[in-house]
């Protein structure tokens, strides 16, 4: 009668198998991360596409682009007891004004201000940065309108200043930034001064407008990567807000142009290129190689 001896793995064979599995996992994880980031960036691009088209649709209806609202303390004051954000919906920002044009008409028509302010509009969140949810009890936005270089020469302007129409974009709509991803401090979500109020009613500040300018920690005008951990220096106030465009993507920030198209602005472009792109009427042509 034949006898067979059942033989198990030796220790060396087991270690070899484990090493092979570790190598395969090491190769697989970066690939999965790249695929996930590509999907997130596509979603982010689509978000900006929807918002850009909403800006244009509102222009078709009203004859002008949406504005950035006003601060509650700016004259005329809607409610003297509340200077944190406007309580008059007519003074709320573009984030509220375009809701009917991004399939959020029900939220737009909701009469309870608190419900609107705590609403979570998925289109306003970049999945590479954070989940679509409330932070500090209110809804947020990861995107901002472009106010140019000085707050008045972009497509988005403060309520009460000159209205911006397509004809005012003399540099051409395809050459001018309308909206983009805003740079944030990832460890300060819901607490930094540019992310501590509702998406619809923060007043005229960097929660809903960004520009081609420098931040405390940078010498260029953006876009720049999000800040993972806020430290002092350079930030003496760890909760201070940022002014630039930026993102949590690996290569750059998505920007919606005045014609509704979306482009990726790479990190580290020249100051002049960013400034020219954000101004609506500086007369400076854009060079595609700059981006």
Image (cartoon, rainbow, N blue to C red):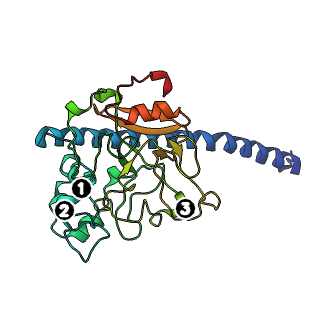
Q: Which dot, 1 or 2, sits closer to the camera?
A: 2
Q: Is residue 14 above or below residue 110?
A: above
Helix, strand or loop for disc 3? helix
Q: Is residue 165 above or below residue 135?
A: above
Q: Position of residue 202 (x, y in %)?
A: 32, 62
Q: Earlier in the sequence, mark 1 or mark 2?
A: 2
Position of residue 184 relative to residue 50, above or below, is below
Mark number for residue 184? none
Indicate the position of residue 286 as horizontal and vertical percent values: 41, 24
* 139 or 94: nearer the viewer: 94
Tags 1 and 3 in contact by the CB under 8 Å rule? no
Drawn side of residue 86 relative to residue 266, left or right: left
Q: Earlier in the sequence, mark 3 or mark 2?
A: 2
Q: What residue do we see at 49% from left, 26% from top?
A: 290
Residue with the mark numbered 2: 89
Residue 96: mark in rendering: 1
User: Looking at the image, do the residues carrying marks 3 and 2 touch, with CB atoms under 8 Å apart?
Assistant: no
**Residue matched to label 3:** 187
For the residue labelled by badge 2, is the local secondary structure a helix, a strand or a loop? helix
For the residue labelled by badge 1, is the local secondary structure a helix, a strand or a loop?
helix
Q: How far apart in space, not on screen, are marks 1 and 3 (Cα)?
A: 26 Å
> Residue 90 appears in which quarter of the rendering?
bottom left
């Amino acid at each position: 009668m034949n006898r067979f001896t059942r033989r198990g793995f030796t220790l060396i064979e087991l270690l070899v198998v484990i090493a092979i599995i570790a190598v395969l996992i090491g190769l697989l994880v970066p690939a999965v991360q790249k695929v996930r980031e590509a999907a997130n960036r596509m979603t982010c691009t689509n978000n900006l596409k929807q918002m850009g088209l909403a800006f244009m649709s509102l222009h078709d209806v009203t004859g002008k682009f949406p504005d950035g609202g006003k601060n509650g303390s700016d004259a005329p004051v809607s409610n003297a007891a509340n200077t944190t954000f406007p309580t008059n919906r007519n003074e709320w920002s573009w984030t509220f004004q375009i809701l009917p044009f991004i399939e959020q008409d029900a939220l737009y028509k909701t009469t309870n201000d608190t419900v609107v302010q705590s609403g979570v509009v998925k289109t306003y969140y970049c999945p590479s940065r954070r989940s679509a949810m409330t932070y500090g009890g209110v809804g947020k936005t990861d995107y901002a309108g472009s106010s140019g270089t000085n707050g008045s020469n972009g497509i988005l302007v403060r309520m009460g200043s000159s209205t911006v129409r397509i004809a005012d974009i003399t540099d051409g709509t395809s050459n001018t930034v309308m909206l983009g991803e805003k740079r944030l401090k990832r460890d300060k979500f819901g607490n930094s001064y540019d992310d501590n109020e509702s998406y619809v009613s923060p007043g005229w500040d960097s929660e809903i407008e960004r520009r081609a300018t420098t931040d405390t920690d940078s010498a260029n005008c953006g876009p720049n990567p999000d800040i993972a951990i806020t430290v002092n220096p350079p930030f003496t106030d760890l909760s201070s807000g940022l002014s630039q465009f930026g993102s949590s993507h690996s290569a750059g920030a998505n920007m919606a142009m005045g014609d509704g198209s979306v482009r990726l602005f790479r990190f580290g472009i020249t100051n002049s290129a960013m400034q020219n792109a954000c101004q609506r009427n500086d007369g400076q042509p854009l060079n595609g190689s700059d981006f």
